[in-house]
Image (cartoon, rainbow, N blue to C red):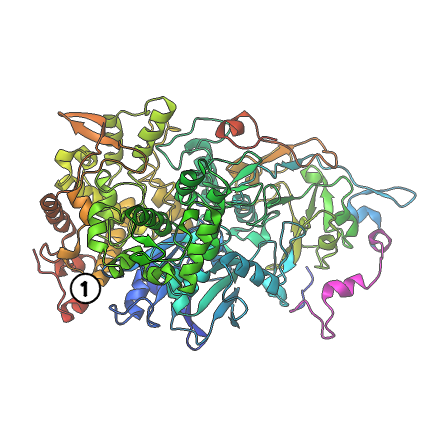
C-alpha cells in the first residue's frame, strides 16, 4: 500500500481529495484496463459488474439507536469498538420527530456500484471469491477516496479508515478476523446477529431501488404497543 | 489496559488549563463511581466545604465497559462530588446518566473528566480526541440545555438531522471522520442560577438530576462539555465478547419475535419504552442508550417527550389531570421543560405536591403567608411549569426561596417541622423527594437511602413489586411463588449465605438482622457492579429471568464474565462485591468527615410517626413476606417505621458493616482489611475514627 501523506492538506491549502479530483474525470478503465476491475468490459466500453449474491435490508422505523451494530461491526473487523470504523452507520438527531430522528446507512451492494467504477486501482471490486460482494483490497488502495466520494446514497456507505489509511466497506462479514463465524453471502453477519430489535435482515435477492428499506415490525412489535406501519 | 482509554482529563477551570491523570493509578478501583470517589478523596483536601466552593472536585467517570458490546453497560456515566441537595448536610453524593456521551468520551481517549476550580467567566469545554479547548460561553449562558447543545453543534459545523452526516472532525487526517453528532453535557438556566434543583442534561432526555450537580456547574461557570471521539475501545477477547453478546440476545432476552414481557427481569424483557403518560398514537420508536439490550425510552412523531422515561413521564401528569380532567399537551411539554431548563424531575414532582398542599392550606399566594404572585390557577398547564422554572432560574418570587430546594424553602418559611410531620412534604430521606416507593413499605429502598447519601434509585428488589402490581392489573399471577422467588434471589446474593428471610418484608421482620444483610448486600453490589462497572440499574441485577428454563437470571456469572472478556482480568463476582464494600467504606469515610453521626440517620418524621395509608400506586403495596409462617406476596402497606425498631435495625447494620455502633463511623479493623489504612489514619487525625467493636 502506498504511503499516506502526514496531513490531508497540501501546502497550498488544497486537500488531497480536491487535488485528486482536479486531475479531471479520467476513466479508471482507460488508465488501467477493465480486467483488473473484475468486471466485464463490453466492446462499447461499458462495464458490467456481476451482481452481489447478498444484501442487507433495514427497517429504519424499528431501529432503537443503540449503535450495537456499529460496535459489533468494528469489533469483528478490526478488534476494537470504533464507531468511525463501522461499515454500517446509525445517524441520530435526538430532537427530531420519529421517524426522522434515525437513519441507517448500510451498503446496498449496488447492482451498478459507483464505488467500483470510481476506483483507479481495482482495490474496490466485486469479489468473485465471496459471492461478488463489493469490497476493498486494502493492499491495493492508494487512499484517493474516489470511492468514498462516489457513493450516491445519503451518508456515503464507503468508510475511510483513518487509522490505517484506506477505504473499506461492508463485506457482509466475509472477512472478520475477530469473529469466528462464516460470513459473506449465505453466512451470518455481526450486525444482524447482535441487533436487539432485529431491524436488519439479510437477503440474497437483489432489491429494487426502494427495496432496501423494509418493514420488519410484525405482530410481536404490535403486541408491545409500537407502530407497525 | 483493555477496556480503559488510559487517561483521565484533569481540568483546572480557574486557569483554563488541563493535565492528564494516568488511569493506571486508579485501575484497582475498577471504574465509574469507585474511581470517582478515589480521585475525590485524593484531590479534595477539605471534605467539609460547600458544594459551590471552587475547591469542590467533580468527577465524571466511565468504566472499562463503556463504549463496548457489553449489554446494557456501555452507555452509563457516573458523576460525583459534594452536592447541594441533601439536608441537613449536602453530602458527597453521586448521579448517573445514560445516552452516548460515555462512549464518545472513551472514543476520544479519556476514561473520565475531573473538574476543579471555577472559571472566571462562563465557559464551555470542547474535547476533540486529545485536544481540549476552553471556549467563551457568553453567547450560551442563559440558553436552555437543548438550545445550548444545538448551538454548539452549529459552531462546530455539524448539521441537524440525519442526512449526509459524514464529516472530517478536524483539519488533521489523523482525527478521522464520523457521522455521530458531538455528545454534549450541559446545564440550563436552573443550573446557571446555582440552584440545588439544577441537573446535567445530555441530548434530549439523559439527565443527571440528583445531587444538584447542575447548580455546582453553575457555581463553577461551566455551561457545557462537548465531546467528539474517533478512536476505539480495545477489549481483551473480541471474539468471546461478540459471541457473549449474541448469546445474551438469543438465550437471555425476549424480543418481539418471541416470549412474553417479563416484568420481574429487566434484562430479560422485550424492548419496551417505560412511560407513565399515555403513549401517542401517531408513531413512536423505542430508543436506547449506547449498547443497551432493550431500550427503555422512546422518540415520538411530534418530537415532544423524546428520550424522557419512567418517572419523568409522570411528573406533571397528575397536575394536568387535576386541572384539565385528562392528560393534555401539558403532560408532555411540562417534562420537556424540565429537560430544557435542566431541572431535577423528582424534586419538581414532589415540590409541586408540596405547593398544592400549601395552596390547600391557604398559606401560599399573593398577599398570603408565603407571598407569591405566580398564577397558581394555572398549575397543571404548560405555562405554569415554565413560570415556576423561570422563577427558580431568575431567583424571583418563590424561586428565590426555592434555590436550595423545597426542604430548605420550608425551613425559611418556618414550616419544616410541621409539614415534614404531616407528610405534606413527601421528602423522606435526607430532604430528598420520595422515589414513589414508600420507605414504610419497601424497606430496602428507604433504609438503603438513609444509610447512604441519597435516594438509592436502585430497582434490584423493586422489580418484584412491579411484577405483582402489573400482573394484578393485567389479570395473571406472577410466574414464581413468593417462596420460589425468594429462594432464587437469595441463592444469587453471594457471598452471603442464602437466607430467604432477607426478603421477608413482613412487619415482624422489618427491623431484623436479615433485612440489614439485604441492605448491606445491595450497597456493595451497587457500589461496584452498578455504579463502578456501570451495569445499568434497569437491567441488572438479573435475578429472575423467564427466558431461562430454570428462571434463573445471569447475575452472579454475567457480570464478571463480561467484565473479564473486556479487561482480560479474572475477577469473580465475590471480588466485585468486596470492591463494592471497599468503595462503600470510602464513601462513608467522606460522610464521616462531613460530619455524619448516628443520631442524624433517621427518616422524616412522618415516616416514623404516621402509618402509610396511600402510596403513589394506591393503598396496597405487595412484596414477598412470611405470613403465619408461610410465604406469600403480601400487602405490607399500613405501617410506619418505629423509631426504636429502626435503632435496633441500625445496630444490626453497623455491626454487619463493621462500623462503630455509637457513631456509624468506619473502624480501623474494617478499613485495614480493605486496604484503606491511610483512610483510617485520616479519620483518626480528624478525631473521627470509629471505635473498634
Residue B69 appears anywhere in the view: no
The residue depicted at 50 percent of the width and 45 percent of the height is: B305
**Secondary structure beneath label 1:** loop
Identity of the residue drawn at 56% across and 63% down: B152
- Identify which residue is drawn at 17% across, 28% down: B626
Residue B126 x/y as whole percent? 52, 66
Count the labels in the image.
1
Most common SS among magenta residues? loop
Task: Give the x, y percent position of residue B514.
Answer: 15, 39
Magenta segment boundaries in residue numbering: A7-31
A24 lies left or right of A219:
right
Residue A174 falls left or right of residue A144 = left
Give the chain of mark 1: B
Out of B48 and B268, give the one closest to the viewer.
B48
- The image quarter containing residue A133 is top right
The percent position of residue B314, horizontal first and vertical second, equals 41, 42
- Please name whichever residue, A202 or B354, is drawn nearer the observer in this view of the structure: B354
Q: Which residue is mark 1?
A: B595
Q: Quadrant of residue B438?
A: top left
Q: Residue furthest right?
A: A44
Image coords of residue B185 (percent x, y)? 47, 59
* Quarter containing the C terminus of chain B: bottom left
Say which quarter of the image contains residue A227.
top right
Residue B508 seen in this snapshot: yes
Give the residue at the far left of this rendering.
Answer: B693
Q: Is residue A23 magenta?
A: yes
Mark 1 neighbour density, 10 Å: few (under 14) some (14–19) many (20 or more): some
- Image quarter (top left, top right, bottom left or bottom right) of the N terminus of chain B: bottom left
Q: Is residue B570 part of the magenta span, yes or no?
A: no
Amino acid at each position: 500500500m502506498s504511503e499516506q501523506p502526514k496531513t490531508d492538506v497540501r501546502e497550498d491549502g488544497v486537500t488531497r481529495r480536491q487535488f485528486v479530483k482536479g486531475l479531471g474525470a479520467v476513466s479508471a478503465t482507460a488508465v488501467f484496463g477493465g480486467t483488473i476491475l473484475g468486471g466485464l468490459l463490453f466492446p462499447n466500453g461499458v462495464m458490467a459488474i456481476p451482481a452481489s449474491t447478498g444484501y442487507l435490508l433495514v427497517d429504519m422505523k424499528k431501529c432503537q439507536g443503540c449503535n450495537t451494530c456499529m460496535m459489533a461491526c468494528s469489533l469483528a473487523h478490526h478488534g476494537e469498538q470504533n464507531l468511525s470504523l463501522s461499515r454500517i452507520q446509525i445517524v441520530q438527531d435526538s430532537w427530531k420527530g420519529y421517524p426522522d430522528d434515525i437513519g441507517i446507512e448500510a451498503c446496498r451492494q449496488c447492482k451498478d456500484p459507483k464505488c467500483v467504477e470510481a476506483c483507479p486501482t481495482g482495490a474496490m471490486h466485486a469479489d468473485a471469491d465471496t459471492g461478488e460482494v463489493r469490497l476493498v483490497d486494502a493492499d491495493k488502495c492508494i487512499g484517493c477516496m474516489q470511492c468514498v466520494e462516489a457513493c450516491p446514497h445519503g451518508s456515503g456507505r464507503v468508510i475511510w479508515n483513518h487509522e490505517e489509511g484506506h477505504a473499506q466497506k461492508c463485506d457482509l462479514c466475509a472477512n472478520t478476523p475477530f469473529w469466528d463465524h462464516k460470513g459473506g453471502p449465505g453466512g451470518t453477519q455481526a450486525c444482524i446477529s447482535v441487533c436487539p430489535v432485529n431491524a436488519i435482515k439479510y437477503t440474497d435477492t437483489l432489491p429494487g431501488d426502494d427495496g432496501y428499506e423494509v418493514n420488519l415490525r410484525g405482530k410481536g412489535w404490535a403486541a408491545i404497543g409500537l407502530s407497525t406501519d | 489496559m483493555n477496556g480503559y482509554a488510559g487517561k483521565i482529563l484533569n481540568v483546572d477551570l480557574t486557569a483554563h488549563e488541563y493535565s492528564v491523570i494516568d488511569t493506571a493509578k486508579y485501575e484497582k478501583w475498577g471504574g465509574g463511581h469507585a474511581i470517582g470517589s478515589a480521585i475525590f478523596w485524593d484531590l479534595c483536601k477539605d471534605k467539609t466545604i460547600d458544594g459551590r466552593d471552587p475547591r469542590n472536585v467533580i468527577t465524571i467517570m466511565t468504566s472499562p465497559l463503556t463504549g463496548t458490546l457489553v449489554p446494557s453497560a456501555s452507555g452509563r456515566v457516573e458523576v460525583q462530588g459534594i452536592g447541594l441537595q441533601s439536608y441537613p448536610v449536602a453530602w458527597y453524593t453521586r448521579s448517573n446518566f445514560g445516552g452516548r456521551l460515555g462512549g464518545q468520551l472513551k472514543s476520544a481517549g479519556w476514561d473520565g473528566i475531573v473538574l476543579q476550580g471555577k472559571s472566571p467567566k462562563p465557559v464551555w469545554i470542547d474535547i476533540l480526541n486529545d485536544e481540549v479547548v476552553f471556549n467563551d460561553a457568553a453567547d450560551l449562558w442563559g440558553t436552555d440545555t437543548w438550545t445550548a447543545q444545538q448551538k454548539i453543534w452549529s459552531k462546530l459545523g455539524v448539521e441537524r438531522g440525519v442526512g449526509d452526516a459524514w464529516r472530517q472532525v478536524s483539519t488533521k487526517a489523523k482525527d478521522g471522520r464520523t457521522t455521530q453528532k458531538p455528545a454534549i453535557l450541559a446545564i440550563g438556566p436552573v443550573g446557571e442560577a446555582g440552584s440545588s434543583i439544577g441537573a446535567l442534561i445530555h441530548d434530549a432526555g439523559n439527565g443527571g438530576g440528583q445531587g444538584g450537580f447542575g447548580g455546582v456547574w453553575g457555581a463553577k461557570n461551566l455551561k457545557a462539555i462537548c465531546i467528539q471521539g474517533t478512536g476505539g475501545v480495545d477489549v481483551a477477547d473480541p471474539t468471546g465478547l461478540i459471541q457473549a453478546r449474541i448469546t445474551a440476545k438469543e438465550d437471555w432476552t425476549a424480543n418481539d419475535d418471541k416470549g412474553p414481557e417479563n416484568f420481574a427481569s429487566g434484562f430479560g424483557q422485550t424492548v419496551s419504552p417505560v412511560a407513565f403518560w399515555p403513549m401517542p398514537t401517531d408513531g413512536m420508536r423505542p430508543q436506547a442508550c449506547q449498547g443497551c439490550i432493550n431500550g427503555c425510552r422512546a422518540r415520538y412523531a411530534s418530537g415532544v417527550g423524546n428520550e424522557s422515561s419512567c418517572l419523568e413521564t409522570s411528573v406533571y401528569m397528575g397536575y394536568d389531570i387535576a386541572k384539565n380532567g385528562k392528560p393534555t399537551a401539558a403532560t408532555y411539554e411540562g417534562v420537556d421543560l424540565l429537560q430544557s431548563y435542566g431541572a431535577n424531575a423528582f424534586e419538581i414532582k414532589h415540590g409541586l405536591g408540596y405547593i398544592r398542599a400549601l395552596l390547600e392550606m391557604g398559606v401560599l399566594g399573593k398577599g398570603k403567608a408565603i407571598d407569591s404572585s405566580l398564577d397558581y390557577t394555572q398549575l397543571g398547564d404548560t405555562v405554569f411549569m415554565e413560570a415556576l422554572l423561570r422563577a427558580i432560574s431568575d431567583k424571583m418570587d418563590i424561586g428565590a426561596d426555592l434555590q436550595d430546594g423545597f426542604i430548605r424553602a420550608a425551613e425559611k418559611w418556618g414550616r419544616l417541622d410541621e409539614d415534614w410531620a404531616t407528610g405534606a412534604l413527601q421528602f423522606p430521606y435526607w430532604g430528598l423527594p420520595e422515589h414513589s416507593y414508600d420507605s414504610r413499605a419497601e424497606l430496602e429502598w428507604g433504609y438503603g437511602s438513609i444509610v447512604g447519601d441519597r435516594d438509592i434509585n436502585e430497582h434490584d428488589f423493586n422489580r418484584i413489586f412491579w411484577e405483582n402490581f402489573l400482573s394484578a392489573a393485567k389479570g395473571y399471577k406472577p410466574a414464581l411463588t413468593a417462596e420460589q422467588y425468594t429462594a432464587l434471589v437469595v441463592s444469587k446474593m453471594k457471598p452471603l449465605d442464602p437466607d430467604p428471610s432477607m426478603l421477608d418484608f413482613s412487619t415482624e421482620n422489618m427491623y431484623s438482622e436479615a433485612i440489614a444483610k439485604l441492605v448491606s448486600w445491595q450497597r456493595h453490589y451497587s457500589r461496584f457492579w452498578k455504579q463502578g462497572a456501570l451495569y445499568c440499574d434497569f437491567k441488572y441485577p438479573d435475578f429472575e429471568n423467564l427466558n431461562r428454563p430454570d428462571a434463573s437470571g445471569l447475575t452472579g456469572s454475567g457480570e464478571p464474565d463480561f467484565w473479564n472478556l473486556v479487561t482480560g482480568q479474572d475477577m469473580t463476582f465475590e471480588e466485585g462485591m468486596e470492591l463494592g464494600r471497599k468503595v462503600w467504606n470510602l464513601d462513608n469515610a467522606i460522610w464521616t468527615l462531613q460530619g455524619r453521626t448516628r443520631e442524624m440517620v433517621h427518616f422524616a418524621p412522618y415516616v416514623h410517626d404516621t402509618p402509610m395509608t396511600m402510596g403513589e400506586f394506591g393503598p396496597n403495596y405487595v412484596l414477598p413476606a412470611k405470613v403465619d409462617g408461610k410465604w406469600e406476596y403480601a400487602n405490607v402497606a399500613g405501617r410506619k417505621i418505629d423509631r426504636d425498631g429502626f435503632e435496633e435495625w441500625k445496630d444490626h447494620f453497623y455491626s454487619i458493616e463493621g462500623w462503630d455502633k455509637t457513631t456509624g463511623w468506619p473502624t480501623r479493623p474494617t478499613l485495614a482489611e480493605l486496604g484503606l489504612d491511610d483512610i483510617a489514619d485520616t479519620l483518626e487525625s480528624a478525631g473521627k475514627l470509629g471505635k473498634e467493636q
